[in-house]
C-alpha cells in the first residue's frame, strides 16, 4: 500500500543545468559572431551588383542614343560625334527629325550610384582619355562612379 506521494521530479522532467545553459549560450554567441561578417559582405556584394547594373543601364542608353543619332533620326550638335550632351538628355528625351512631335526617351530616371547614394556620376567625353576624371563638357561618351572606395576584388569603383 502506498502511503505518500513522492515530491521528487522524474529525471526526464528536469530542466537544463547551469553548465548546459552556459554551453548553449556560448554556441549561440559563436554562431552569431560568424554570421555578422557574412551579412556585411552580402551587403557590399549587393551594392556592387547594383553599381554594375546601373553602369550597364546608363551605358546602354548612351549607346542607343548614339545609334539613333548615327541613323540620322535625331539632330545632334556639331562636334558631339552623335553622343548625348548630358545625362539629363537621356531622361528628358529628344525630338525625332521627321517633323513629328514624337520624342524618344532613353532612360526613365537617372539611376543612383549605390556607393555614393546620389545620382552624381562622373562623365567622360569622346575626346577625353579613357581614365580622365575631368569632363570637357562636349558630350557624354562614358560614365564612372565618383566613389573613391575599393571593391571586394581590389579594383577601384571609379575604374569600373
Image (cartoon, rainbow, N blue to C red):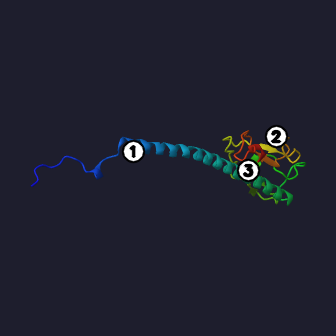
Q: Nearer the viewer, mark 2 or mark 1?
A: 1
Circle nearer the N terminus (3, 1): 1
2 or 1: tag closer to the N-terminus? 1
Q: Which percent across, then down, holds residue 61? A: 76, 54
Secondary structure at numbered mark 3? helix
Residue at the far right in the pictured view:
79
Query: Residue 136 appears at what percent x and percent y?
Result: 85, 41
Q: Is residue 94 above or below residue 21?
A: below
Which of these two is toward me, 31 or 38? 31
Residue that lies at the very extreme toward the front in this rendered image = 1
Give how far across and how far down residue 127 sits, in percent.
Answer: 89, 46
Q: Are marks 3 and 1 in contact (CB under 8 Å)?
A: no
- Hey, which quadrant is residue 156 in on the image? top right
Give neighbour class at mark 1: few <14, some 14-19, many 20+ (Cα, 10 Å): few
Of residue 130 and residue 74, the one placed in the foreground of this image is: 130
Mark drawn on residue 55: 3
Say which residue appears at 59% left-offset and 47% top-offset. Answer: 38
Position of 107 relative to 23 (above/below): below
Q: Is residue 58 left or right of residue 34?
A: right
Lower sequence index among marks 3 and 2? 3
Give how far apart the Cα atoms at labels 3 and 1 are: 53 Å
User: Which mark is on residue 133?
Assistant: 2
Using the image, tell me which numbered label, if any, was put on residue 20.
1
Separation (CA) of disc 2 from disc 1: 61 Å
Quarter that holds the N terminus: bottom left
Q: Which secondary structure lies at badge 2?
A: loop
Label 3 neighbour load within 10 Å: few <14, some 14-19, many 20+: many
- Asked if the residues shown at circle 3 and circle 2 are in contact, with their CB atoms under 8 angstroms apart, the answer is no
Q: Position of residue 19 (x, y in %)?
A: 39, 42
Determine the secondary structure under disc 1. helix
Labels 3, 1: front one? 1
Packing grade of label 2 (10 A; few <14, some 14-19, many >=20) is: some
Amino acid at each position: 500500500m502506498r502511503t505518500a506521494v513522492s515530491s521528487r521530479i522524474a529525471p526526464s522532467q528536469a530542466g537544463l543545468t547551469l553548465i548546459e545553459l552556459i554551453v548553449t549560450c556560448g554556441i549561440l554567441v559563436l554562431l552569431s559572431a560568424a554570421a555578422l561578417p557574412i551579412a556585411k559582405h552580402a551587403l557590399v556584394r549587393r551594392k556592387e551588383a547594383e553599381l554594375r547594373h546601373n553602369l550597364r543601364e546608363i551605358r546602354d542608353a548612351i549607346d542607343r542614343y548614339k545609334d539613333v543619332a548615327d541613323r540620322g533620326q535625331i539632330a545632334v550638335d556639331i562636334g558631339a560625334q552623335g553622343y548625348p550632351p548630358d545625362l539629363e538628355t537621356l531622361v528628358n528625351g529628344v525630338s525625332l527629325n521627321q517633323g513629328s512631335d514624337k520624342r524618344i526617351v532613353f532612360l526613365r530616371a537617372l539611376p543612383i550610384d549605390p556607393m555614393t547614394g546620389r545620382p552624381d556620376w562622373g562623365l567622360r567625353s569622346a575626346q577625353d582619355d579613357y581614365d580622365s576624371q575631368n569632363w570637357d563638357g562636349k558630350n557624354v561618351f562614358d560614365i564612372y562612379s565618383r566613389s573613391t572606395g575599393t571593391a571586394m576584388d581590389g579594383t577601384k569603383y571609379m575604374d569600373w
